[in-house]
Amino acid sequence: MRSRAGLSLRLPTRTLTVTDYSPALPCTELRRPPLAQAVRYCRDLTRQHSKTFYLGSQLFSPPERAAVWAVYAACRAGDDIVDEAGNGDRERELREWRSRIDAAFAGQPADDPISTALAWAAGRYAIPHSAFAELHEGLNMDLRGHEYRDMDDLLLYCRRVAGVVGFMVAPISGYRGGAATLNDALQLGQAMQLTNILRDVGEDLTRGRVYLPQSLLDEYGLSRAALERWGQGEPLSPAYRALMTHLGGLAREWYAAGRAGIPQLDGRGPLAVLTAARAYEGILDDLERAGYDNFGRRAYVSGRRKLLMLPQAWWELRSLGAVHG
């Protein structure tokens, strides 16, 4: 199986089905310490760092949302190591993060809330350990200042740091359709990450990061020096807006491909994932309305607009016969 950009997609070696996840836990189990405290910690971290992801997560059943929060918190912990300022040994810290992930999957979690919650989630649902290995590779790309030569390079990064999150969440909800559904989940995650990249061009530049592929910059007659000037307030060029329009269109293609698999999720999964997808795509809408000014402002979706997306998502799924539970 290959992506639109021609990059080979490595799916988990075992196809997961609805029989791979256990029935919902009684809520009483989630109230017992230390799991209760661990889940609350992961919930609060999710709410603090991604209101969009948090909105979607609340639509899962209680045990499913607890597992989703654990997955998000574990991913976020690695991301924070890469992004934190200072001269600490971030490569060592990232290796330690990976060791804690591995220990949690082995059922021997470290004594911290994220490890506790992740060990429970990994023991309860068929979350692929290999997805975290790919995430680790993606975080290392950031840590080592990877330079993106072409779209295949950028696609690989989007897969590693966000696409694989679809592999983590799908078995929590349960799903039908095998590898095809996983591929749709992968493309949805990639669309969300590309949206983040387009939103944060100016912010990332202040960290010394440029995710826009050099081949595309060359094609549109752009340079890093031009990005620096726009970061200092110079008006954006038509060529830059054209590049953003091109990448925004690619993100739209990935959203469309990813949405095709949402009805294959079980239970409350379709509503949770579609609501989050609509909210992320709303960031792209806002960016487009602002003429792709991603240096002087940060595109966002208001809380009110996000809430309005919930009934819209429900009606869309109802029309597809995909409203469950």
Image (spheres, helix red, strand yellow):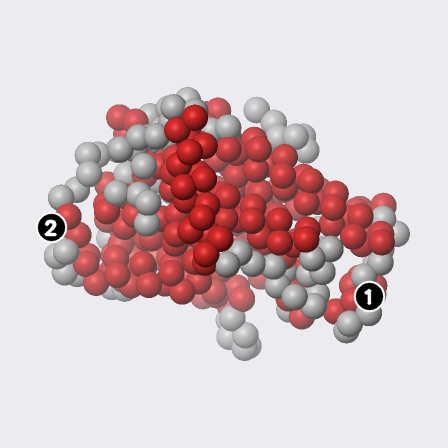
The residue sitting at the bottom extreme is 86
Residue 325 seen in render: yes
User: Which residue lies under the disc numbered 2?
Assistant: 28
Query: Please, what secondary structure does the residue beneath circle 1 have?
Result: loop
| Residue beneath the point at 57% across and 33% down | 256
Q: Which amino acid, mark 1?
A: Pro
Left or right: residue 28 compared with residue 324: left
| Residue beneath the point at 47% across and 29% down | 261
Report the Cα–Cα distance between label 2 and label 1. Answer: 57 Å
- Identify the disc placed on residue 235: 1
Q: Which amino acid, mark 2?
A: Thr
| Residue beneath the point at 42% across and 33% down | 315
Camera-near label (2 vs 1) is: 1
Residue 75, percent from left and from top? 43, 54
| Residue beneath the point at 56% across and 42% down | 190
Quadrant containing the N terminus in the rendered view: top right
Task: Give the vertical position of 4 relative to 93 (above or below).
Answer: above
Instruction: Specify which label sits upstream in the sequence, 2 or 1.
Output: 2
Q: Nearer the viewer, residue 99 or 212?
A: 212
The residue sitting at the right extreme is 221
Do tag 2 and tag 1 residues touch (Cβ < 8 Å)? no
Residue 248, percent from left and from top? 68, 45
